[in-house]
Image (cartoon, helix red, strand yellow):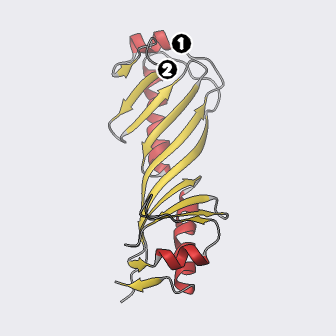
Amino acid sequence: MELNPSIRIENIVATVTLDQELDLKLIGRNVPNIEYEPDEFPGLIMRLEGPRLTALIFNSGKMVVTGAKSTQELIKGFKRIIKTLTRYGIIIVGKPKIQIQNIVASANLNVEVNLEKAAYLLRNTMYEPEQFPGLIHRMDDPKVVLLIFSSGKMVITGAKSEEEVYKAVNQIYKTLKDLSCVKEI
């Protein structure tokens, strides 16, 4: 019985650009649950519980948002951040620009992978089992890095969309099968 690969988004890192400067002192004073220690870090740290995200907010109007498990969760969380700031008198002008910088995902191919053979047959790979137990494969399209383990488990980094994650996993699964580098568990 063949199982399809299972895939899980672990973390989405996005940048947000507001076309305005922000008064971090004012936000730090007025908005609850915000950490602002300018001597330690030049930005505000805002943590949300639902969805569970962390935003680093800088006076340039730029933000880094991490922790989302889906694009929808990222957008929902970002809207909550803006709503919270607005509720405490911070006026946001213009339309924020959200850009996904990196998606980290895990996958299970549900097969065993012969890493030695895969390293020999695949381009753009690095496999040094004495250094690291997984094969590192740099895929060109989509442009992601895959850490592939003999158990069939994988870590995917560098994707810019959820579609790229799914495309990369399904593509490597098919390639490894075609090269006879997998064994049913």
Which circle marks residue 87 in the picture? Answer: none
Residue 7 seen anywhere in this rendered image of the structure: no
Q: How many residues crowd mark 1 within 10 Å: few (<14), some (14–19), many (20+)?
A: few
Sequence-wise first label, 1 or 2: 1
Task: Examine the rendered structure and indicate whether residue 162 appears above or below residue 152.
Answer: above
Q: Dot 2, crowdedness within 10 Å: few (<14), some or many (≥20)?
A: many
Q: From this viewpoint, which residue is outermost toward the bottom?
A: 1
Instruction: Tell me whether circle 1 and circle 2 mark residues in contact (CB < 8 Å).
Output: no
**What's under tag 1, amino acid-wise?**
Asp
Q: Position of residue 121 (x, y in %)?
A: 60, 78
Q: Residue furthest front?
A: 130
Q: In this picture, is 78 found above or below 38?
A: below
Give the residue type that dot 2 points to: Gly
106 or 89: nearer the viewer = 106
Q: Which residue is found at the position 39% from the left and 81% from the top?
A: 3
Residue that badge 2 annotates: 43
Q: CA distance from mark 1 to mark 2?
A: 10 Å
x then y, percent, for residue 95:
63, 32
Which corner quadrant of the image does residue 171 belong to?
bottom right
Q: Residue at x 41, y 16 (%)?
A: 36
Could you tell me which secondary element the residue under label 1 belongs to? loop
Q: Position of residue 75 (x, y in %)?
A: 50, 43
Q: Is residue 23 above or below residue 85?
A: above
Q: What residue would you read off at disc 1? A: 23
Question: Regarding mark 2 in the picture, which secondary structure is present there?
Answer: loop
Q: Position of residue 52 (x, y in %)?
A: 36, 40
